[in-house]
Image (cartoon, rainbow, N blue to C red):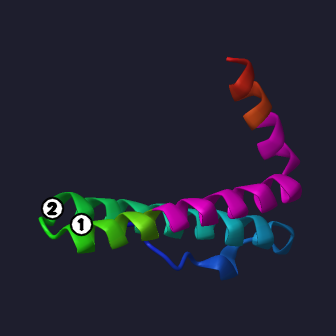
């Protein structure tokens, strides 16, 4: 698991929102991994179903954070565009 919360007080004021969004993405990815790992080891179908459903919700949250990050960080937009070209 990631070390959250980050030491956001060390982040430049103009970068704080981007770091908040990135930290949110990291937290959601950690949650997805945790729920999917637990789902993979349980034999209880009801528990597995709930864990996987929650993991899907967390994936939606990742997308929401990414959308906001792309609005805030033009460098990130350029990186994504370059990746899509490859």
Query: Residue 41 appears at what percent x and percent y?
Result: 15, 61
Q: Check contact, mark 2 vs mark 1: CB within 8 A.
A: yes
Furthest residue toward top: 86
Q: Which residues are magenta?
A: 56-79
Furthest residue toward front: 46
Classified by dominant secondary structure, the portion drawn in magenta counts as: helix
The residue that label 2 is drawn on is 41
What's the residue at 37%, 60% (across, down)?
33
Q: Which quadrant, please, contains the C terminus?
A: top right
The front one of 58 and 80 is 58
Q: Is residue 57 magenta?
A: yes
The front one of 83 and 55 is 55
- The residues tagged by marks 2 and 1 sit, at their Cα atoms, a distance apart of 5 Å
The front one of 40 and 49 is 49
Q: Is residue 6 above or below residue 70?
A: below
Query: Residue 48 appears at what percent x and percent y?
Result: 26, 66
The residue that label 1 is drawn on is 38
What's the residue at 82%, 42% (across, down)?
77
Answer yes or no: is residue 2 visible: no
The front one of 41 and 28 is 41
Query: Residue 68 appears at what percent x and percent y?
Result: 80, 62
What's the residue at 60%, 68% (across, down)?
23
Q: Is residue 78 above or below residue 64?
A: above
What secondary structure is marked by label 2? helix
Which numbered tag is attached to residue 24?
none
Q: Which quadrant, please, contains the N terminus?
A: bottom left
């Amino acid at each position: 698991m990631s070390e959250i919360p980050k030491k956001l007080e060390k982040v430049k004021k103009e970068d704080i929102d981007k770091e908040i969004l990135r930290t949110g993405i990291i937290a959601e990815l950690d949650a997805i991994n945790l729920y999917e790992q637990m789902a993979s080891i349980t034999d209880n179908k009801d528990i597995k179903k709930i864990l996987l459903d929650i993991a899907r919700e967390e994936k939606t949250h990742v997308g929401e954070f990414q959308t906001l990050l792309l609005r805030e960080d033009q460098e990130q937009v350029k990186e994504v565009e370059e990746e899509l070209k490859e």
